[in-house]
Amino acid sequence: MRIEIIHRISLVCLSLLICVLTVNAGALRDAKNILPAEQDIREDNDQLGQLVEAFLKNQKRVLDFQSSGLDNNEYLRLIECQVRAFASCQDKATGAIIDPVYKIEWQYSTPCYALSIGLLARTGYLRDNTLIKSGIKALDCSVSEMHENRCAHHHGEFFIQPIMLAMDLYKGLVSEAQMTVWDEKMAEIDPYVLYRDNLKRKKICYNHNVVALSGEYLRLKKGLGSHNDFFHIHLEHQQQYMSDFGLYIDNKTNPPMVYDEFTRQFMASILVEGYSGTSFDFYSRKLRLGAWTSLFMQSPYGEVPTGGRSAQHIWNEAAAAVTYEIYASQYATLGKKQEAGAFKRAAHLALKSIGRWIREDGSGFIVKNRFPIEVMHGYESYSAQSQYNLLACWLMCVAYLYADNSIDECPSPADAGGYVLVMKDVFHKVFANSGGNYVEYELSGDPRYNATGLIRIHLRNSNPQLGPSDGIPHKWDNKKKKDLGGELYAVGPEWFDAKGEVHRLAEYTNILFPDTSYFSAYGGDKLPEIDVKNIKLSVDGVAFEVVYTGRFDGVSRISQRIDIDHTGITIRDILKGNVKKMRACYPMLVDDGMEETKIDFQEKKVILQSRDGRICFQAISPQNVTVQRKQRRIPYRNGYADIAYFESDVNRMQYKITTEF
């Protein structure tokens, strides 16, 4: 009887602890202050500083702002959906997670699964003992794989952080003897042996190395690492890859957008965990810049920018959520409610984006389309159902660990708009937003992944994928790493030269990189110049113009002016040169893998409707034109596209993309 009473009391105490953890407003992990001491952002980047100042002044003018209604439990809900979907994929003998398509353990799925269950159990969100035992088995498998240097696909860099975080979460769920075994195994790891991305093997170390550093710092902090030189040498090495906007440059030519956000949030986690060494001041300043830049790049649907490899994967937004939650908490600690609320809002927008892509079984669509997972439409060669869904869970776990649930949402730049962010550096992008109508402009595309020109339009109260949400790249076989040829498309001009041959702005890629450029065939001729002009910046609307000057197959100057206001996007294209005929092209999503778009042509416009939104492409001038389609079925990340267009004998055209018909 006495034992039974004690057992019941223990259960009550555990239940009370669970309730406290579940409703606790503060973050689960103790975050250190990482913001620079009272430093004006304009000292590090004047353009960004001006945007931040203007945003904070205009933030309260967003009169129609509505909170998302989300809180920290949304992380747990999405994570639990995934965990339950992948529980049946666990190898009962080893504890490894087996990919449902490839039928093998794929990269770092297993430690991500273990971490996810650990967080759900620690917060009391999950009370399923069978799943908790499954998580313990997965963690034991992951620790052994690291210790024995047999991580799937040699991805040890991606094991260390989720394992170190998970070990903290499983305290009290396993015996002290088991924890000791795990500690001893983790203490024996040699980072120069386990991690392939290190300076003893390579001259250049990119994002894999930073992923490892985030876990190595936790190992050092816990006293389980003896290779202090690895962490400090490599953290200093990574400084060279931070841009003037605080973004991480994962490749010196055409760096992928998502590996900026992905890598940068690992750097921020190192700082909030307590790093205060010689690189602290540098990263403190750079990462604050990057955090604010992220806000101005975020679409009103919570999506991170498209561009480069791994774009349009749902884990992209999970990575961004880590940064947003960290800086929301940082500003809240200083009592800066406007800033904290903007970052919290951005985190919740990112969560809403992820929520759009959950399948019936609880797992996610890897890429933002709805094809069966076996088709792997839009995947990279390394994309897999298990590893990339569970990567999203890993990142959402980290976001939750640093999230402060007491922070109220305030409008973010994605809501307020009123800005044009121009990056003519290695990222060569323009982002602009007016009242939640948003564009992303690619100044110099990478043909494997993106066309040049206006590649993304996200309008309020529509379906973001109809926008379009991405440009159309060359056909590219990622498995064979082979360019299969194909036409590049963005929203913009196409023309016929004096010989009748067709060209479009979208196909002039790698303009900024002459060694790999379309223009390298011109030999010593001067490469084209790109100029971006801000024409209008106000709360009522913004406008910018992109001008290309050079040799473009019969054209010497290409101009695109883009006006954004509450009604939508208005575009004016002007060509200078010997042009027989000109067209304005608009890539239309015609099939997302589950639903074909309803398409209605009405002389001077076409209306697209799919799932939860509509959008209209409308010719404005010249007057005597008819919108037509090319009758293509072109594969790209979001599904299949056709091209709507209208044409004229003049070299000046104007058109509009709107949700108002």
Image (cartoon, rainbow, N blue to C red):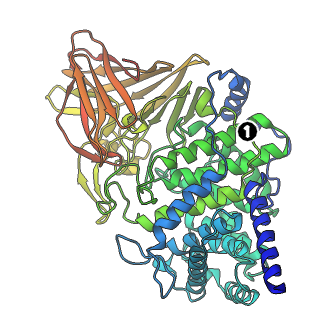
Task: Identify which residue, 415 or 307, lies in the foreground.
Answer: 415
Above or below, 173 relative to 630: below
Tell me the residue at 46%/59% (across/down): 362
For residue 277, what is the image quadrant?
Answer: bottom right
Please tell me whether mark 1 sits on a helix, a strand or a loop: loop
Q: Quadrant of residue 407?
A: top right
Up the image or down, 530 lies above or below 168; here it is above
In the rendered image, residue 606, in percent from the top left (x then y), is placed at 27, 24
Q: Is residue 138 visible?
A: yes
Which quadrant holds the N terminus? bottom right
Q: Which amino acid is tagged 1?
A: Asp
Tell me: 633 left or right of 464.
left
* Residue at the image point whose x is 70% and y is 68% from the top: 122
Residue under numbered circle 1: 408
Left or right: 360 with respect to 232? left
From this view, report whether residue 36 is shown above or below residue 103.
above
Q: Nearer the viewer, residue 619 or 345?
A: 345
Q: Position of residue 246 (x, y in %)?
A: 65, 47
In terms of depth relative to the viewer, which is nearer, 314 or 578? 314
The C terminus lies in which quarter of the figure? top left
User: Residue 62: horizontal and vertical position, in percent?
Assistant: 65, 23
Query: Residue 373 is drawn in which quadrant?
Result: bottom left
Q: Position of residue 243 (x, y in %)?
A: 62, 48
Q: Residues within 10 Å of mark 1 (few under 14, many from 20)?
A: some
Picture layout, residue 42 above or below residue 310: above
